[in-house]
Image: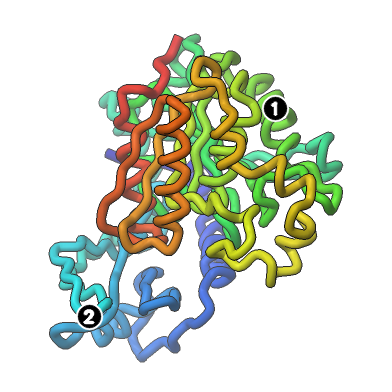
Amino acid sequence: MVIGATKSILGNSTADDKERAHRSRRHAPFAPARIGAKPLGRFFAEHRDRQWIVEDKRTIDELMRGAPHRYTFGRTARLAGIHSTTHLVDWVDRIEKTGTVICRSIVRTMVRLRSLLMAAALLLAVVSGSAVTEVRDHLFVSAALQQRVHYRVLVPDDYARTTTRYPVLYLLHGHGGVFSNWSDRTTVAEDMAGRPLIVVMPDGANSWYVDGANGEAWETYLTKDLIAEIDANYRTVPTRDGRMIAGLSMGGYGAVKAGLKHPELYSFVGSFSGAHDITRPGDVFRGESKPDVMSIFGPIGSVVRTSNDVYALAASASPADVPYFWIACGSNDPWLEPNRELVRVIKSRGLRYEYHERPGGHDWGFWQWSIRALLADPHLPARH
């Protein structure tokens, strides 16, 4: 199956590579030097609490040499980016030992495909009826923010061939992330292929998706401007039953908050490793020590904090009105207890939910599993 991003397949691969590399480096505190061999693709690695991009096969081989080693390699190949050579890594063994995850991995190399060959492959996939997910990037002016904001849309493979209206999943990124993270760092485009669903990935900056004390109205942008923009430009199911929202970390908090504060808008809420305690003293993120968080929420006890406290919102929610909650957190995640606490409140209030706790941390490996599991959930709305 071929997953294609329109603009990259049609010949702007060099510019796309540079932009994707730039975004990758923004989130990489450390990048090892290249060692001799010609780079064959980008490779994402984690070493304890540090992350970086490895761009050289020889470097990768050297890192992986030795048994055991302390490098956890996650899958970073995106079929949506087949214009560049990419290494795939399968996790074939995972052993917990003295707090260190030790992995043995198998490396496969995808051969570089030139634009003509990729276009031919895409055409062949369409002719043969294979599922192709189209990736579209947009920029629009938010009235609430008074600025231009990016968002990315994944369109189902049969969108252009039908007049069908599709439900929409709004998928939020985390703190320090950008709108393209989900499709760049997971296989969500591949996983949704063949599913009757539009996925919208908006930029949320580091806003916590809140109408903040700093005057920036990111919640209004998310729940009003963005929905109007999508419903006006795509064949959506423009009702609560056809609208879902989910996210990771900061985005998990934002999704739960949006579902609780605007239950008339969403029928389904997903949270992966949600940073739900951000409004409270002593939160895991240590928001009280971060100027950007303080500028958004204000001091402890502020109106912005109390009105955006998801525990308090859930405790006063009406079971008949709120969405279905799909919550997941890794057993090694620093936000495990805040997630367990939210589930306790949701359960005691009698709200509809399911909770998934499994081995994993606050990382893309766990979020890859989460989005794949959520997309397979029978509670997701169907197309009309």
x then y, percent, for residue 54: 39, 77
Q: Amino acid at mark 2?
A: Thr
Judged left or right of residue 208, residue 374 is: left
x then y, percent, for residue 221: 74, 36
- Residue 60, picture quadrant: bottom left
Judged left or right of residue 341, residue 179 is: right
Q: Viewer-nearest of labels 1 and 2?
A: 2
User: Residue 77: which disc?
Assistant: none
- Residue 152 visible in the current orientation: no
**Closer-to-camera residue (323/201):** 323
Marks 1/2: CA distance?
50 Å
Residue underneath mark 2? 98
Residue underneath mark 1? 229
Residue at 33% across, 58% down: 365
Judged left or right of residue 288, residue 375 is: left
x then y, percent, for residue 287: 65, 64
